[in-house]
Image (cartoon, helix red, strand yellow):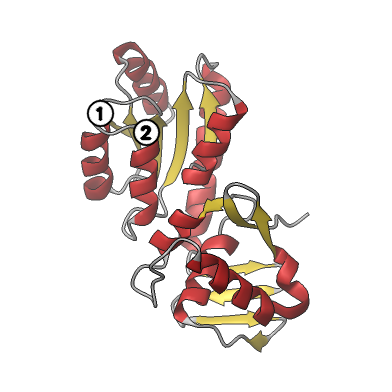
């Protein structure tokens, strides 16, 4: 079985050495970039299973790297663990809204970090096994056949509505900004203005009928799919 690959995008040499050594000991293949521009290049070429991404990077900062990875269909499924020296709640919210899957503040303990890396890699493996079908709250979305069903009944969705539902449902609990949702809908009947997303969400909720509450508004951020309890 091929090794899972981790891309570390970090400009602190001592931290790179520690992470590379310990993640390699776990049987993972590790590649490294020391600035955001190189990190984006490696992510697009190597398509790693997970990116460990520092927030404060030269050339292209971590938030912009995260945003670009999430807006590119080729890299949007890559798991992202964000590292930052900042610990304020607002930074965590911004990190998640840009598309990070997990968030760790420096300084951190190594064993818990590795545990979180492994958890994200397991999620990545599960996603690859069933990555084209999402089932949540009685809604089944098949990306290959471009069919969405609610309790077995096919929903008549526009291309943008389908992409919005797919994007939100495949990562329940994570908030997406309107701009991020716009990026994900490019190539469908792509909206031109940020607030157009609100119109599509309103229409999607209408078609979901009694399940409309699945799509939650996150004040000051955008939208998310409600987590299943």
- Residue 7: x, y in percent? 33, 36
Pointer 1 and pointer 2: residues touching (CB < 8 Å)?
A: no
Q: Which mark is residue 35?
A: 1
Numbered disc 1: secondary structure = loop
Identify the residue at horizontal 34%, vertical 61% (top origin). 73
Q: Position of residue 62 (x, y in %)?
A: 37, 33
Q: Is residue 177 above or below residue 64?
A: below
The C terminus sits in image quarter:
bottom right
Give SS at disc 2. helix
Q: Residue at x 57, y 48 (%)?
A: 221
Residue at 36% across / 20% down in the picture?
21
Can the viewer see residue 4 in this picture?
no
Mark 2 residue crowding within 10 angstroms, few (<14) / some (14–19) / many (20+): many
- Report x, y in % for residue 217: 66, 57
Is 45 placed above or below 116 here?
A: below
Badge number at residue 87: none
Residue designated by label 2: 62
Q: Nearer the viewer, residue 6 or 192?
A: 192
């Amino acid at each position: 079985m091929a090794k899972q690959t981790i891309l570390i995008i970090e400009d602190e040499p001592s931290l790179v050495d520690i992470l590379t050594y310990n993640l390699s000991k776990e049987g993972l293949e590790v590649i490294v970039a020391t600035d955001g521009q190189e990190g984006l290049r490696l992510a697009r070429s190597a398509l790693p299973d997970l990116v460990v991404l520092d927030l404060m990077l030269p050339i292209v900062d971590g938030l912009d790297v995260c945003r670009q990875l999430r807006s590119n269909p080729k890299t949007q499924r890559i798991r992202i663990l964000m590292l930052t020296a900042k610990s304020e709640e607002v930074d965590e919210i911004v990190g998640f809204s840009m598309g990070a899957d997990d968030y760790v503040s420096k300084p951190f303990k190594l064993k818990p970090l590795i545990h979180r890396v492994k958890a994200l890699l397991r999620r990545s493996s599960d996603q690859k096994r069933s990555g084209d079908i999402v089932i949540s709250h009685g809604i089944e979305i098949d990306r290959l056949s471009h069919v969405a069903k609610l309790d077995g009944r096919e929903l008549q969705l526009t291309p943008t509505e389908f992409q919005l539902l797919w994007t939100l449902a495949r990562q329940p609990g994570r908030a997406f900004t309107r701009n991020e949702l716009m990026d994900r809908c490019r190539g469908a009947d792509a909206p031109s203005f940020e607030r157009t997303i609100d119109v599509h969400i309103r229409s999607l909720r209408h078609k979901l009928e009694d399940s409309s509450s699945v799509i939650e508004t996150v004040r000051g951020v955008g939208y998310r799919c409600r987590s299943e309890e």
